[in-house]
Amino acid sequence: MAYIKKRHFISIYLLVLVGILACKREQKKEKITGNEISKPNIIILYADDLGYGEMGAYGATELKTPNLDKLANGGLRFTHGYASSATCTPSRYALLTGIYPWRNKRAKILPGTAPLIIDTTQATIPRMLKEQGYQTGIVGKWHLGLGNGNVDWNKRIAPGPNEIGFDYSNILAATQDRVPTVYIENGHVVNLDPNDPIEVDYTKNFPGEPTGLENPEMLKMKWHHGHNNSIVNGIPRIGFMKGGEAAKWIDEDMADYFLAKAQDFVKQHKDTPFFLYYALQQPHVPRTPHPRFVGKSGMGPRGDVIVEADWAIGEFIKTLETEGLLENTLIIFSSDNGPVVNDGYYDDSVEKLGNHKPAGDLRGGKYSLFEAGTRVPFLTYWKGKINPGVSGAMVSQLDLFSSLAALVGSDESTDDSKNLSDVLLGKTQTGRDELVIEATSRTAFRKGDWAMIPPYEGPAISENVNIELANADDYQLYNLKDDIGQQNNLAEKEPEKLQEMITAFEAVRGMGDTEIQQLELK
Ligand code: NG6
Ligand code: CA
């Protein structure tokens, strides 16, 4: 009897369990069906060091970027779209978290061995979207640190992108010019041979290993400044690396590699809402176009890799089209910081620049507090949803967190990140009124048509990269409406405006300006 009772009980239990599971499945299905209608796929295409003047749609005449232009002309082209910083790590930190990078002291250009600078409990775009039912992926450049310090590259590398909200990751750890020069998929070095373990060190070389400094005869690309540590594929890098021969990437294949991974991700997840952050490596150094693109721009490797990136984006969009996804996908294209021509290698970029103006009419470039450091190409595209046009609204990549959250029905937001979803979709041209921009630990301010740069110590022009950094003894104030090239400093002529700007800047920045400088210049 007891036996029967027990069996009976188990059957009922199983029935109830099956019932609950079936119910859950039903709910999930409904949710997914709902998502298909209301939740678009979201793709962020992110270039590395692409300047404001580098696409046909932004006025480039010497470089051909037909695929990016197609995106720009079929979507919304922002003329006041900003990266949060004039360098990579801080911009990428702000993009993913919606937090100003100067709030995180670790958000500086990182070595390949740096620990992860995003807290694993922190809100991020991928985590927020995951909570809304999205499949989330990153393909390409990471540069936000990995692990907790002392990473063993031969074991699973964590925490990293998969611990801050990405379901899938296939990344290069830091930059193309920094070791380790390997792809990392979901925390594992791709093609790692356990008999040839990888070691990485940024302070000292491994005995007997060649370096760019000591073995110039081994180099196919010469270093100009920095970049004289370990040699990989004939290119000297930043940092020292040993082992991992089979896992080392081939620089010229990188564009094809990441494109294929981005296409795979989209194809695999076309039936659920997905978020893909496709972070291209071009035109950051070392510029290594695939042989198919060599000589295509007439501008040397820097121009050639921009042509290559444009091609990759064209191919990627074709995949979206073939898969029937264009009408249900919001695409955002931008760059992590402004342009630099010579960033440390002799690669003909200076000699062959010709009449090309990477920053367009803007002053400065990468590393600069002038406009070209952070004002970058910024496009939104959604076939049938976003009307083609140009928007003069001020938007920052910082705003993507709250804007995308609002778009997909999440109530998450941060104080720094403004919900500009209507601006991104072209429903209004009222963007942000003010924005703090950052460049190598210094900050400046934009409000309305005005740009204010506090005094900073340091060279006016960086000798190595030949870029005006905006360091000066006195305040600088520019009216960007009349003076987009920041040639007329109005700080003395417009003391009231200057004071208004300083006050508004300090209100956001959170401390007196002197205090900021002491902090940053230490
Ligand atoms: C600098 C590198 C530069 C580039 C940059 C990071 C030297 C001398 N210069 O330190 O080549 O790698 O860091 O670029 O090493 S970013 O786009 O990732 O911020
Ligand atoms: Ca960059």
Image (cartoon, helix red, strand yellow):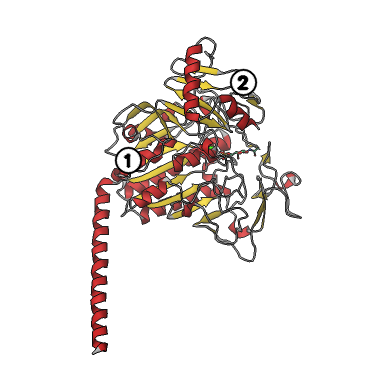
Taking 236 as reference, is 275 left or right?
left
Foreground residue among 353 and 476: 476
Q: Where is residue 236 in the image (x, y as percent from the top left)?
A: 67, 45
Element type at marker 2?
loop
Q: Is residue 310 above or below residue 182?
A: above
| Discs 2, 1 touching: Cβ within 8 Å | no
Q: Residue at x 54, y 16 (%)?
A: 487
Taking 482 as reference, is 5 left or right?
left
Q: Which residue is drawn at 35% across and 34% down?
A: 420
Dot 2 amino acid type: Ala
Foreground residue among 84 and 382: 84
Q: Where is residue 503 in the image (x, y as percent from the top left)?
A: 48, 21
Specify which label sits upstream in the sequence, 2 or 1: 1
The quarter of the image that holds ligand 1 is top right
Taking 82 as reference, is 200 left or right?
right
Residue 459 seen in render: yes
Residue 359 seen in render: no
Number of marks in picture: 2
Q: Where is residue 307 in the image (x, y as percent from the top left)?
A: 49, 38
Task: Please name the residue that numbered disc 1 is placed on.
Answer: 406
Q: Quadrant of residue 364?
A: top right
Dot 1 amino acid type: Ala
Foreground residue among 382 and 30: 30
Report the residue that reaches farthest toward the top: 493
Task: Please name the residue that numbered disc 2 is placed on.
Answer: 472
Q: Residue 168 shows which numbered tag?
A: none
Element type at marker 1?
helix
